[in-house]
Image (tube, rainbow, N blue to C red):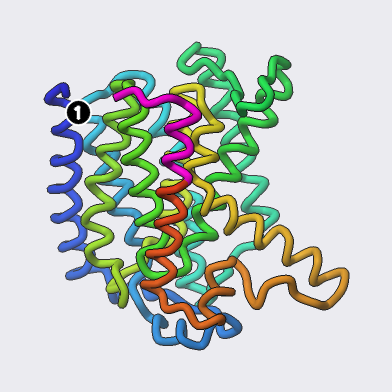
Amino acid sequence: MPINTLASFFLSLVLSIIGFKIYLKYFKSFLPKYVRDYGPKSHLAKQGTPTMGGAVIWLSTLITLLILAPNREIIASLLLITGYAFIGGIDDYLGIKKKSSQPSKARYKFAIECIITLIWLLTVKHFSIFDLKADFLLFHITSTFWIYVFETLFIVGMANAVNETDGVDGLAGTITSILLVFIFMMFKDTNLSLLTLALLGGLSVFLFYNAHPAKLIMGDVGSLSLGSSIAVMGIIVGKEWVVLILGVVFLIEAFSVMLQVPYYKLTKKRIFKMTPIHHHFELSGWSEPQIVTRFSLLTLIAAILGVFINGPKW
């Protein structure tokens, strides 16, 4: 393993340790999380828990990669991740200011994400930074127009799927960490390895504080930037379908919302007790640590399936 690759993990780890110490000492009182009152009653105890912890993960990753590997693939990846970090950060800030768990309208947020993503895709294609293959296993897209459509939906969808998953202490961070480890082992790409290990360094420290009962929450700045990071990895190796298999928990969380909302509007009945689906299991009696453990096991099973289909590279 190249020394730079290993250094990306430990540099990000050290930067995150320092960053979270500063965050908890100087900023936590200014960044209280507001919990929706129609969610699980147990979550009302989380009211006031510091949010936007994901900003430290993003900054640690950004600084680490700009120091160790400021090449154009890395810079292009960081530009998209930073764009999503800013979208999430603004949403978090508005939530604090308005004392609301849902400060912005979803359709406006979705539109901004699509525009930023499409601009990014057009840019990396124009400068031949990434080869946009839109490989989804069962079908391979060749039309340029549809490549942009599917890649946009892939990135926006993955970012928001991770965001939906971030509703239980340790869940989004743990699932993402497992996914990153398997991506690192499956593909021998230097830039991919640098990105995965830098993110893992930051997530390792974050999870120390985010374990139940959480001392801080990643916020949209964390979940959206992590989700976009995962999507970028699929694009780097041209294996988007692998990311979709490994991220099966994220997909289940997102689809549970996509099914529940229109079904309730049409019938005034619910398919699940509450969505995203981790809340359904909470209301069914599962504790937060049980949800994290069981969803992590599902991710491990999906990851092993992904390795089998793709073929191991180690």
How many numbered marks are there?
1
What amino acid does circle 1 point to? Thr
What secondary structure predominates along the stretch shown in magenta?
helix
Q: Please state the horizontal and vertical placement of residue 224, each as a whole percent of the image.
A: 48, 50
> Position of 15 compared to 41: left or right?
left
Tell me what residue is drawn at x 58 percent, y 19 percent.
133
Query: Is 180 in front, or is 12?
Result: 180
> Position of 109 compared to 195: left or right?
right
Q: Is residue 50 visible?
A: yes
Q: On the image, numbered disc 1 is attached to which residue?
A: 5
> Position of 231 compared to 182: left or right?
right
Work out whether 293 lies above or below 80. Answer: below
Q: Please state the horizontal and vertical placement of residue 179, each as a whole percent of the image.
A: 39, 44
**Residue 307 included in the magenta stretch of the image:** yes
**Residue 109 included in the magenta stretch of the image:** no
Q: Please state the horizontal and vertical placement of residue 44, each as a whole percent of the image.
A: 46, 86
Query: Is 237 in front, or is 60?
Result: 237
> Position of 216 compared to 131: left or right?
left
